[in-house]
Image (spheres, rainbow, N blue to C red):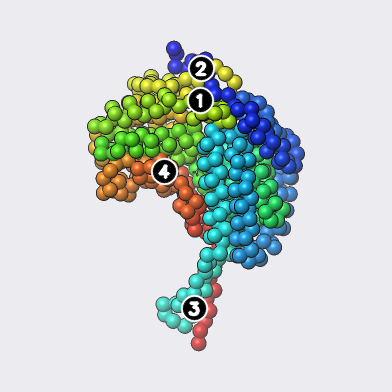
Amino acid sequence: MSLTSTVTAPLIAADPDNLRHADAVIQSIELPGQGIPVQDPATAETIAHVPDADVETALAAVATADKAGVEWAKTSLRHRADVLRAWYDKLVAHSEDLAYLISREMGKPLAEARGEVKYGNDFVRWYAEEAVRPVGNFRETPDGGANLLTRRSPVGLAVLITPWNFPLAMATRKIAPALAAGCPAVIKPATLTPLTTYFAVQLAVEAGVPEELVQVVTTSKSGAFSEAVLLDPRVRKVSFTGSTPVGRRLLELASRNVLRSSMELGGNAPLIVFDDADLERAVEGTLAAKLRNGGQSCIGANRIYVQDGIADDFVAALTERFAQIQVGHGLGTGTGLGALIDDRAVAEMKAYTENAVSLGAELLTGGHGYDSPGNFFAPTVLDRVTADSDVATSEIFGPIAAVQRFSSESEVIGRANATEFGLAGYVFTENLDRALNVADSLQTGIVGINQGVPSNAAAPFGGIKQSGLGREGSSEGLEEYENIRFYNVSRR
Ligand code: NAD
């Protein structure tokens, strides 16, 4: 079998009742036009069309949101909190609808879509609570004679640009803090998965968010969109989640308008398993950190470093778990790995595998696509990957576990940090000192210690180095949408 071959193997089909549920949700979404087809990545079937906005339409959305933002900025903190809480309740009531929709348009298994819905909804609840926290303070000047009153105010109109991999969570973790801070927003979801954003914003309006305050704009002309919208003087903030090259381009545009900028960009996460790790914990954590979302996660374990003493056992156990995973439609029964987002992703997985093997890696399971419609690639384990392989130097964004071996702590820290990215890292060890020392040494914004899913609405998610600027979630995520100001009050 050539490495690039496809195999004819049974893929789990969608359950017809599940498809009917997802399609009923799609029918309930009010779309303001039709232009761009949206496909189910597991079948290549077109499931909806969304508007393809031109620059004039995008600027009209800016004008509409900006106008609605004037009143919103004057609302009380309690009012904003109540509206966000009502939105959260709506999202919870429609959790199943959201999960079926996400699975249909993005491809992830229904169980994972449910996990994303819980995570995505949590941001709305968190910012409903955070909206009323103290937002200013009163200070003495050190020399006396004056008081300083610091306060926070909404930064202004926020442009929110989201990727396709977590269609709900990426939207709520930007929209909720923007609204809590008192800002209007224009959100541009990825054209591959726009339906979830339309549906979530529709629920927000039903819950009491003013209809014009959050504008959804879908367009196939992203470059023209950002060039027009980010230079508009009414816009004061851009928050982007996506790849580092696009983030760099948006920062260039933002610099011309001196926009407050939050950038959640690419990653190349190291995951380190020491000899003294609990084997089962390490294997399960790696499975979650690698295969969650089909490996299409910015914090996905990209370079798996395993210490020599545990490596054979770890690799054998991981390979066994990968080989058991069933591949198929996200809405099928028993699917553990769904479709990748597009056929380009499948071609990339094949190329990564071939390149790694040509440089000396051993292919232990997977490494192939499937002879069927849809974008499927098998769960794959590569052992003894070389550091110069494409799979080690690039962000994989797919279901390939690329294992490298190491002997000492200092060696692995050097190798883990030898990347321009700094989003997430993982450490597996039963030695607390080692866990914390290694976590301190990793140049990443996030470290998972003995666990593969570190994200939480209460955590300040974000990267260092070329993985980005700013934080999302937690109280820090709210500050991204606030101006800090002070009044100096002279006292006699
Ligand atoms: P992408 O950068 O290609 O696209 C992201 C979004 O930007 C999409 O909506 C796309 O339409 C839009 N876009 C592209 N060019 C644009 C332009 N010139 N102006 C305005 N918008 C533009 O990324 P992707 O392939 O959709 O997502 C995968 C990437 O996102 C990976 O690199 C991943 O690491 C990153 N990501 C990061 C985080 C994080 O929090 N750090 C989270 C999820 C994904």
- Which callout, 2 or 3, points at the residue further toward the start of the chain? 2
Question: Where is mark 3, residue-wise?
Answer: 147
Residue appearing at x 58%, y 31% in the figure? 331
Q: Is residue 406 left or right of residue 178?
A: left
The nearer-to-camera label among 1 and 3 is 1
Q: State if disc 3 and disc 1 touch (CB < 8 Å).
A: no
Question: Residue 22, image x and y in percent?
Answer: 65, 35
| Left or right position of 279 against 295 | left
How many numbered badges does the structure rendering display? 4
Where does residue 143 sit, x and y in percent of width and height? 42, 80
Earlier-in-chain disc, 4 versus 1: 1
Instruction: State which mark lies toward you, 4 or 3.
Output: 4
Cα gap from disc 4 to disc 1, whole angstroms: 27 Å
- CA gap between label 2 and label 4 equals 35 Å
Q: Quadrant of the N terminus?
A: top left
CA separation in Å, label 1 and label 3: 64 Å
Labels 1 & 2 near each other (Cβ < 8 A): yes
Outermost residue, bottom direction? 492
User: Which residue is painted at 55% across and 38% down in the image?
Assistant: 113
Q: Secondary structure at mark 4?
A: strand
User: For the residue marked with disc 4, what is the amino acid?
Assistant: Ala
Residue for badge 4: 424
Helix, strand or loop status at disc 3: strand
Residue receiving disc 1: 327
Q: Nearer the viewer, mark 2 or mark 4?
A: 2
Q: Please state which amino acid type lies under the numbered disc 3.
A: Asn
First in residue order: circle 1 vs circle 2: 2
Q: Where does residue 203 sit, x and y in percent of width and height?
A: 67, 48
Q: Label 1, secondary structure: give it.
A: loop
403 or 158: nearer the viewer: 403
Residue 9's disc number: 2
